[in-house]
Image (cartoon, grey):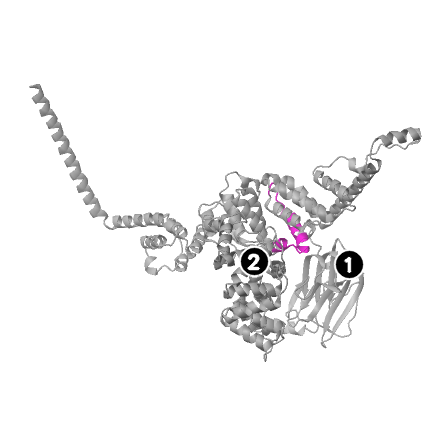
Amino acid sequence: MNNELEYKRVQLVNKPRFTITVWVYILEYCARSLCSIVHRAMWNGSYNTPLIFVTKKGNLHIQVSLTNGETRAAITDITIPRHQWWKLTFNYGKEFNQTKSTEFSFDSAVYMDDTEGLFVIGGSDTTPGFSGFIGKLQWYRNKAVESDQIAYPDPHHPMFQLDFVNREIMCQRFKERNQRLFSAYKTKRNTISAEDSCQQFLYRYIQQGNQMEMTNKCLQSDEPIPKYHKHIRRIMKYQAAMKNTFILTDANRMLYEKGVKLMEKGLRSVKAALPILKQSACFGNYDAMFMVSVILNNGIGVKADEIQSQAYLLLAARGQHRLSSLSLGHKHMYGLDGVPVDKEQAYPYLKYVADTTREDKEIYKNTDVYTESIRLTDEDQIKQQTDEDGDIFHWLKFQAKKGVLSAQQNIGRALFWGSQGLKRNIHTALQYLRMSAETEDAQSMYDYGIILLRGHGTSVNETEAMTHIKKSAEKKNPSALNALGWYALNYDRNTTEAVKYFEEAYSLGCPDAAYNLGILHLTGGFPGKTVDADKALAYFNFAGARNQIDAGIQVASLNMKGTSRHRRHIQIGVEWARFIAEKNPALGLVLRKALKAYRNLDLQSSLFYYLMASDAGLEVASFNSAYLCESSQDGMATVIEKDCQWRNYNLSTLREKQFVHAYSLIKMGDFYWYGCGKKQNIEKAAEYYTQAALKGDPHALFNLGFMIEEDSKLTDDFWIKLKIPLKDRIERNRLLKSLYTRCQESKHTEAYIPCTVALYRILILEQWLKYKFILQVVGFVVVSVMAIFSVVMIYRHTNAGTGALLRTTI
């Protein structure tokens, strides 16, 4: 630390000078009393200087902390305009001397320590944000800058290229046009219904003669149909016939379904589907917005446009669309597709989806499915997938009805969560779970009891539920013990008894119990103990590592904020938020569609859905997209402007090491070894092969051996990572033998033959080099003896033939 700078900073805490300038695009003012534009949040939940909020009416609420510990706030008389970019400059300090349209004087010096707490742009966990977007933001520390001295952003700045203003104008015109079209169709239909026949026109003409008013103008419903508007016209006609008013949600749904049907005909049909999906997006369909974003980002059948792709993502994320939020978080994590790297900006997108995951999983919808990460290279997992007409499902049903406990449990859980290719059906699942509970299996009794207690798919039956749970707890089932603790805490209000059950369940490895203990420590609810965020974090880490969703969210939150003994760890916080967010059923549904299309040999639809999940950041989806493009036989990858194979293999290697598949690492090693990026990079290739080898893949060891045989110069760092002893690294052949021996001894049986051949080739070559002279002499002698023997045999054969000929002649 620079003590001199720190001294100056501390001196300025009570005499701050600063300027904040931020570009804001507000769609809707605050739905609550106040919504944040920027604020500084402290660890204890309070606020510090500065705080800039927007009110319900669009005025600014400015709040600061004073040196005496009090707070002061003022509301401006200015109303922020909506639906356009607007620059807000807020500055404080003695250097500030300019004409202002609004001002406020505080009765005491302002206090601001810009190293305390978190500087939050927009909303946070505890403070809602406004509905809209924040563009460029600049913070001037220890300096008050006049607004006209701050440079205007470049006209090509992304916030302007997103083109929100023109998009809203065009969309509004489209809506108004179709509203008029609906009215015209309705009027025309009512007229026809009233007249019932064309004869009335002739009758009126005869009666009125020349006085009858004529017009040469067409009704709007008879106007020429613009290209790509045929489908919306059909929808307007349908609504005019069936409805009294134009229903926007029905129109956007029907347009979306039509666009999806066109897309599923093949990737070459995406170009025709895109305008229809854009129309659906204009009407407010967030699924259509995300689909348009994926098409534009990858350039599927059209020219790639990353900026407009991002615009659709932002609009959909504002509507709380899960996949769009995941996609924005993913792009900010790695700086993809023109989005800058900003892990702190990635966090709120991922955290939002993580927060909704448990609720999304527990709210029953028959369209929901369990998020299953299945690689297309894993034939065994693909074979385990079934459906309601599949052989596996019928076999499980048969076994379950015969009383086989494992079958009852498997089919009950699969139907309850919508896993293994089955649709979610809680009512049927309950029947199987009830059957398994009747066997008095501890886990089955708990599963059935907790469903009755919560009323999932059935009415709440607390008495029967607790009977099953208590019986399970008597058999020391950890989940049941935790449930008794939860019941004691929430129903009996007996924290002491609850803790007893939680600790017993935790000692048996129950992650839910660990989470509950963590919450008690975090909130100060643990009997006889004060708030202890660090102890809570330890419990949350235990539970989160065992897939407890709520605990994972707490791990993410505490790592982002930090605790008294743990500093902020942004990377861990973001990774945990993403880990939980990727369990959301919205991703599971897209993956299910992709896998189903693949099993039905509809590879183009499968690729499109995997690209959707890949854009949302799912590693297995990037892997499967690359695999489909690599194995494509019908040239479907040529329809996509961005590189499909190598780009997606590379995306799949960006994740944490434990999630990356060895096959992706080998492919990226091949990419650099063979110079697919136009230039060979031996170091990069070796790095990827080494990572794959550390995952136990023999192919990577074989490739490293091949690189050595090709005289590639690799540093000892790679061999140290692979824990190859120094004695095996000092000589080339010994290193090759070590690599090929490991390859041969791999548990992957398909590697045995090529690795054995390579190993014996090295052994034979080694013997040749060691005994080269002796082998050459022996070889010469053997060849000479064989040559002499051959000459003698030929000579004898020739003489024998000549003698026989002479005898025959005589």
**Mark 2 or 1 closer to N-term?**
1
> Between 381 and 81, which is closer to the camera in this rendering?
381
Residue 99 vertical position relative to residue 282 in the rendered view, above or below: below
- Mark nearer the viewer, 2 or 1: 2
Q: Report the residue that reaches farthest toward the top.
A: 809
Res 129 → quadrant: bottom right
222 sits left or right of 506 in the view: right
> Between 697 and 345, which is closer to the camera in this rendering?
697
Q: Is residue 406 visible?
A: yes
Q: Which residue is mark 1?
A: 80
Q: Which residue is mark 2?
A: 431
Q: Which mark is on residue 713? A: none
Per the picture, the main secondary structure of the magenta-coloured stretch is helix
- The amino acid sitting under disc 1 is Ile
556 sits left or right of 219 in the view: left
- The amino acid sitting under disc 2 is Gln
Stretch of the chain drawn in magenta:
300-326
